[in-house]
Image (tube, rainbow, N blue to C red):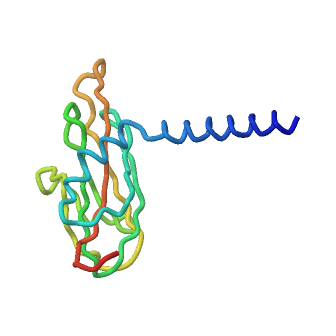
Amino acid sequence: MLKTRSIISLLLLLLIAGFGLQAQSPCHSFARNIAKPLLEDFIHDGNYNATYLEEGESAELYKTFYEGQSYRLVVAVVDQLPSARVRLLDSKRNVVFDNANYEMAPVWDFVAESTGTMIVQIKLPEPADEANIVGGCIAILFGVENTGRRR
């Protein structure tokens, strides 16, 4: 009886581990392989924020920034998608940055003026043809300026 329980426990553990490995979606791989290199010399914060969106959809991400620290925000979309509109909002939802004012730039470097949580909004344009809505992976990554110190 004890041996059977041990075997069942081991099989359950292997099954759980297998699901964990499959949790890395294609969008996670897209973020790691396509978006992360755009951080260049900035140190990646370790989070691969990636999801699947279709034209007309949007998403929000909350991120804490620290006063005086230099950051790079990278947004990458798969080739078949149109450029994504990205807005950075403060806690009162005031627009701090809107890439629509910068030719839909996918990379933005900035220094946080205060410590706090900000909202990153990302939105894909409405589809040109409702019958053929396109979808794909979108990744939002953050990097911290490399000041030469080890973190």
Task: Measuring from the top left, give residue 139's x and y in whole percent.
Answer: 31, 47
Residue furthest to the top in view is: 131
Quadrant location, the N terminus: top right
User: Is 78 on the left-hand or right-hand side of 11?
Assistant: left
* Vertical comparison of 4 with 35: above or below: above
Q: Residue at x 49, y 40 (%)?
A: 21
126 on left or right of 104: right
Q: Residue furthest left?
A: 103
Q: Quadrant of the C terminus?
A: bottom left
As displayed, is residue 77 above or below residue 112?
Answer: above
Residue 52 in picture, x, y percent from top left = 37, 37
Looking at the image, the residue that sits furthest to the front is: 3
| Location of residue 53 (image quadrant) | top left
Image spot of residue 49 (x, y percent): 38, 51
Q: Is residue 104 left or right of residue 86?
A: left
Q: Nearer the viewer, residue 78 or 29?
A: 29
* Res. 113 image quadrant: bottom left
Residue toward you, 129 or 79: 79
What residue is shown at x 28% (from left), y 20% (from top)? Answer: 132
Residue under the image location 81 percent in, 37 percent down: 5
Please state the horizontal and vertical placement of residue 59, each as a whole percent of the image.
Answer: 39, 47
How many dots with numbers?
Answer: 0
